[in-house]
Image: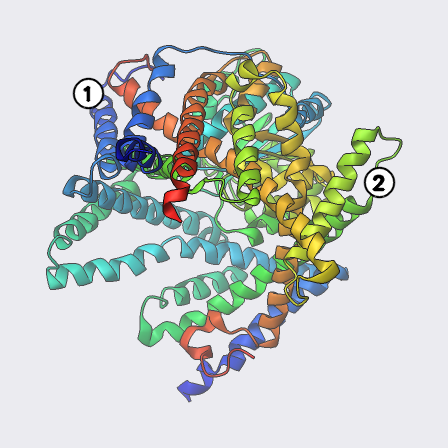
Amino acid sequence: MPYPTEPLEILGAWVGALLTIFIYSYILWRENYAFRWAEHTYIASTFAVAIVQAIRLIRTNIVAPLMEGDIRYIVPIILGLMFYTLPFRRYRWISRYTVSFLIGIGFGVTVRGALSADIVKQILSSVTAPTGGTAMDWFNFIWVSLGFVFIVSYFTFTVEHKGWYYFPTKIGRYILMLGLGVYFGNTVQFRMAMLSGRVQYLLRVFKIIPWP
Amino acid sequence: MTEAEKSIWIKMAEIDRRIIYWALFLLLAVPFIHPLMLPVSISETTKSLYDFIEGLGPDDIVVIGIQSGVSAWPECLPGLVAVTKHLVSRGVKIIVWGFYTDVDMTMNAIKARVPQLKWPDEEVGPGDYKYGEDWVYVGLIAGGEPSVAALADDLHAVIKADYFGTPIDQIPLLSKVKGAKDIALVITSDTGDYGWYYVRQWNSRYGTPIAEVGIAMIYSEFIPYYRAGQVVGLLKGCRGGAEYETLIKSPGEGIQRMDALNVSHLLTIFFIIIGNIGYFATRKYRR
Amino acid sequence: MAAAWRRPEIFIFIVGVVMGISWLGYFFYLPELDATVKLMQTWAVGIATFALVLGFLSAARIHLYYIRRRTPGMWPFSAWLFFFTAVATIAGLYSETTGFYAWQFKWVYTPLGATLYATTGFYICSAAYRAFRARSLEAGILLVAGILVMLGNCTIGEVLWKDIPTINEWLQLYGQAPFIRSIMVTAALGLILYALRVMAGIERGYLGALGAGGGGG
């Protein structure tokens, strides 16, 4: 979108920029009332968005089918309303019915998927050798498979890490550190990309760079 | 070593963090004012996704799941836009939904950058995507893994209407999709756990191919899935987006953002190096 | 009578039954079982919709407390929070695509969300400076790997050293794979064991004070 031309849109762009500067005043300077006001404004906006969208979704996805005659949709309405007793200590026990149901279904779907995707297929991939691969393919296969075993051995605390068991755990630590270093490098990319987006927004509002 | 020399090394090891913050904040502005636009090399995971989408056609239906908020646009939007442009160029049918409250903003941002996608009340020209037949926007879906599982098992039990409130049986594209078995590819854009949900509930149970177009940290976490063949391709945040833009020959915000990454990464490396120099120079005085 | 409905055994039973039906439906195909699992999943989606508002209810109690007590430095902001929430919600219920709700969604909610998320960019730079000291061989390996990946993720790395893309590619696809895979497998094993403990009633943390009497072991 090009630089806003409507007065309310221009006002909005500057309000957004001002709020951004208020938030960063805490980091670049120190805590202050402007930061606190911006923080509370964001929390209030988040609440409003959540309430409005929840009401819309409840209306279209639950109340509408119920009004059309599907009586089964009364259950999520009852359980959902029971959920709202959670913040009130005296009546919190009522919400435990909903929590229990959600825990049950949550674990139910997660565990059945995790068994295949996160355990069986990963172990199979670790023990499946490359077919007709180059020397580098074999090196990578051995690196990943043995590295996996060594790192898991490092995290096994029921066996003391001494004697013959010391060496795989030590190698596992080094491979673990290598992996953490790579993960950190990717984390830096993510965080810096986000921050650059904010700087870019400020430059656009202040008309230092064009708004595409 | 004199006291003055010692104090220089100590200062290197103990720079006030606000100096670091100001340096980062101000220097990040420079690449936007004077862009370099250096070429981007293509990684294996990006090429793998590109090749997979090249194999799709007008008979295939792809789901784009937006589980990254507006705050993650710098990382995720370039990749999402590039992949959507590629899907449109192949004539693939697209269903879009999301689990974050600001999914509408991201959808509008994609639509602004992929003008072939038309809303129901917009005029459809040659090469454009007609709403309801070529693409559909479902909007926000609430819930976590149970919702993703429910969508895979029976889409119609979860989705009653699209974003505009049109009942699902009146939308030609949605009425022919019953669940995960009818979907050729799920492209998920994540900052959190939803990618795993799709792998566990869609790929693990129904064999639906999954692609991750999310932040760089999720890229790391999905490498085992890629190695095991559960995920067909990955884009590493805005770097992956820049690579995909290069592949489809449509430079955009991903390539623009690489210059900002250059500055920020070099600055971080600079501070790490001088911190280590200061640390080693003053190590004997700490013992 | 009321105490009977609060017994932890009832909640543990609900968890066990729901979890058990979900697992049985995965491993054995029976049309009635499959339909039951799909129905429960649909109910979970519906309940999650109600849960969107739960955060507001919890925070509202705290902010009402600040206002009632006139907590210095807090209560005016809490009052502003309620005022803004009310105005934006009423505007949103009237129209989500026009008016004040749409305006604040675009120019308040969106920029502030992005800004708060992006503050971690500052912290990671200063944290890297402070914590990434090569105190030992392990720390040195972490440091070198991190720097190589950072150089590989930006385009200037290739200009400085032509082999950076190859090294970065190996580190991304193979270097970190044992670490990520081991975390994934051990976390999944832990999840399954925890689910079994919840099902057996050994873990009762989700019950809060109701489960405090018989938890653990």
Name the side, left or right, on which C13 lies relative to C175.
Answer: left
Amino acid under label 2? Ala
Q: How is the image coloured?
A: rainbow
**Cα gap from disc 1 to disc 2, whole angstroms:** 65 Å
Pointer 2 local density, CA inside 10 Å: few below 14, some 14–19, many at least 20 = some
Q: Element at badge 2? A: loop
Q: Label 2: chain?
A: A
Residue pointed to by mark 2? A129
Residue A212: x and y in percent read 37, 14
Image height of C125 relative to B200, above or below: above
Q: Is residue C210 visible?
A: yes
Q: Nearer the viewer, residue B92 or B41?
A: B41
Name the side, left or right, on which A39 lies relative to A164.
Answer: left
Q: Nearer the viewer, residue B187 or B35?
A: B35
Q: Which mark is residue A7?
A: 1
- The quadrant of the rendering that contains the C terminus of chain C is bottom right
Q: Quadrant of residue A9?
A: top left
Foreground mark, 1 or 2?
2
Residue C131: x and y in percent read 42, 42
Name the side, left or right, on which C38 lies relative to B162.
Answer: right
Q: Are marks 1 and 2 on the same chain?
A: yes
Image height of A144 relative to A169, above or below: above
Q: Label 1: chain?
A: A
Dot 1 or dot 2: first in sequence order is 1
Q: Which mark is residue C4?
A: none
Q: Quadrant of residue A78?
A: bottom left
Amino acid under label 1? Pro
Residue B267: x and y in percent read 40, 25
